[in-house]
Image: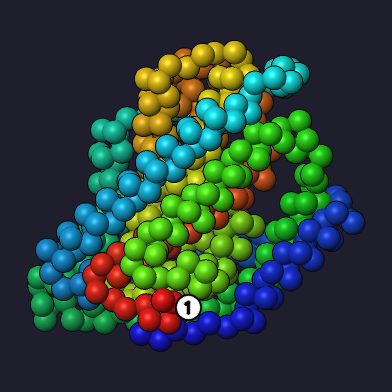
């Protein structure tokens, strides 16, 4: 297990982000010329997702060896993810109830109008739907659509079957192994683009939105940010410390993934980088990272769940609704479920917000209040989503007996 930590990449990406902000502030809308570069970076990342997840998950299962070990890792991973999401939700509820960002001086916010497409995208979901849709009707269609849960399910089946058929599957196994190596190598090439890609994403975003939108919602914005910071620096650090991993060094090792999450606002697009950092910079084995990281990117979003409870209670406060404890529990549960069903793409959290508001009969138009700052908050919550997944992989790897010596 080798741990390579190059300060260079980390510094390059940081400088790229700062330069991106400066260029965005100075050139404003003219930064649109950088859009193709930003697009190429994000498209290159997305290009990797399906083949990388398929090949590395199949090889992960093959390397795990037997179904019992797979089950054990799966149960631990799911337990970790559910546990941290619930902690994030509780933290969000405590903060928004103690600080009350929606009370006083916010009545002017009620004049904002909501974007209708967000409301219409918020179809209802149920636990039963989530489970039935895990089984793909047509795996090629699921791959084309980038549906993660069916892809994970299918890959687990292929890996398990490969284990059972022994020699007959040798040819296919070495093909998938080769595919996995190829994908990992291409991910490294894509990562060479990271500083330029991150710069272009940052410059175009700041150039387009600027910071003006922040002002009227500053209080709400700060509460969400505090919650995200406390979850990342407090709760998740405790999990790392529990398995003797230094949070500071782990954070540093994950910087390329976190910067990619911040600038793309998509935990799914970041997945190849997350896996690359976990394996090459943190030193987690492929068999754990290939299983736990895609699962985390799909079924858990701590940052999104935290943001959703704060936003829902904030909206209730602005509209003058007094939520009972029970209603807040419903909000928390729906946010936890919502973070399982939400896709790791930009603004996915806004769509599940509709369901949360509906669950306690809050006005859906309330989403209009928070839209102005959502693009920016999305960046921060995506960082927490990705960091939560990564901590999960480290936590499970250590429970499985892997030693991350370089990080302790
Ligand atoms: N953009 C987030 C992610 O990809 C999801 C969200 O909160 O909107 O993780």
Queried on whether the Cβ of the residue with tag 1 lies below 8 angstroms from ligand 1, the answer reads no
Query: x and y percent of residue 126 in the render?
Result: 32, 30
Position of residue 50 in the picture relative to residue 374 (left or right):
left
Outermost residue toward the front in this view: 98
What's the residue at 26%, 40% (across, down)?
131
What's the residue at 34%, 63% (across, down)?
242
Q: Quadrant of residue 343?
A: top left
What's the residue at 52%, 69% (across, down)?
248
Outermost residue toward the right in this view: 26
Res. 368 in view: no
Res. 328 in view: yes
Is residue 319 depicted above or below 401 in this figure? above
Picture quarter with the C terminus: bottom left
Picture quarter with the N terminus: bottom left
Position of residue 154 in the picture relative to residue 68 (left or right):
right
Please name the residue that numbered disc 1 is placed on.
281
Dot 1: within a 10 Å radius of its alpha carbon, few (fewer than 14), some, or many (20 or more) residues? many
């Amino acid at each position: 297990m080798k741990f390579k930590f190059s300060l260079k990449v980390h510094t390059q990406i940081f400088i790229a982000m700062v330069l991106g902000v400066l260029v965005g502030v100075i050139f404003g809308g003219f930064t649109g010329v950088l859009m193709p570069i930003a697009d190429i970076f994000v498209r290159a990342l997305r290009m990797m997702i399906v083949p990388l997840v398929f090949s590395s998950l199949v090889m992960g299962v093959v390397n795990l060896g037997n179904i019992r070990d797979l089950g054990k890792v799966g149960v631990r991973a799911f337990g970790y993810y559910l546990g941290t999401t619930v902690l994030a939700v509780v933290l969000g509820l405590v903060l928004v109830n103690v600080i009350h960002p929606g009370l006083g001086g916010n009545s002017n916010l009620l004049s904002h109008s909501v974007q209708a497409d967000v409301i219409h995208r918020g179809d209802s979901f149920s636990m039963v739907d989530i489970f039935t849709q895990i089984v793909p009707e047509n795996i090629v269609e699921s791959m084309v659509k980038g549906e993660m849960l069916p892809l994970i399910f299918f890959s687990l089946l292929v890996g398990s079957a490969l284990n059972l058929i022994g020699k007959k599957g040798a040819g296919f196994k070495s093909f998938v192994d080769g595919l996995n190596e190829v994908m990992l190598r291409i991910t490294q090439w894509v990562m060479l683009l990271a500083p330029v890609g991150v710069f272009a994403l940052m410059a175009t975003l700041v150039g387009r939105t600027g910071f003006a939108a922040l002002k009227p919602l500053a209080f709400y914005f700060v509460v969400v940010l505090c919650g995200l910071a406390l979850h990342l620096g407090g709760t998740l650090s405790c999990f790392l410390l529990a398995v003797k991993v230094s949070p500071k060094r782990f954070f540093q090792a994950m910087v390329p993934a976190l910067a990619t999450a911040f600038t793309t606002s998509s935990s799914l697009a970041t997945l190849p980088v997350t896996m690359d950092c976990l394996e090459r910079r943190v030193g987690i084995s492929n068999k754990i990272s290939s299983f736990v990281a895609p699962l985390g990117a799909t079924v858990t979003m701590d940052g999104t769940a935290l943001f959703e409870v704060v936003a829902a209670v904030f909206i209730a406060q602005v509209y003058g609704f007094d939520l009972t404890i029970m209603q807040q529990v419903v909000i928390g549960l729906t946010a936890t479920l919502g973070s399982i069903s939400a896709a790791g793409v930009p603004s996915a959290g806004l769509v599940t917000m509709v369901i949360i508001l509906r669950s306690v009969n809050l006005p859906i138009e309330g989403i209009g209040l928070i839209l102005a700052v959502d693009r920016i908050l999305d960046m921060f919550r995506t960082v927490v989503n990705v960091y939560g997944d990564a901590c999960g992989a480290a936590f499970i790897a250590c429970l499985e007996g892997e030693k991350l010596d370089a990080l302790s």
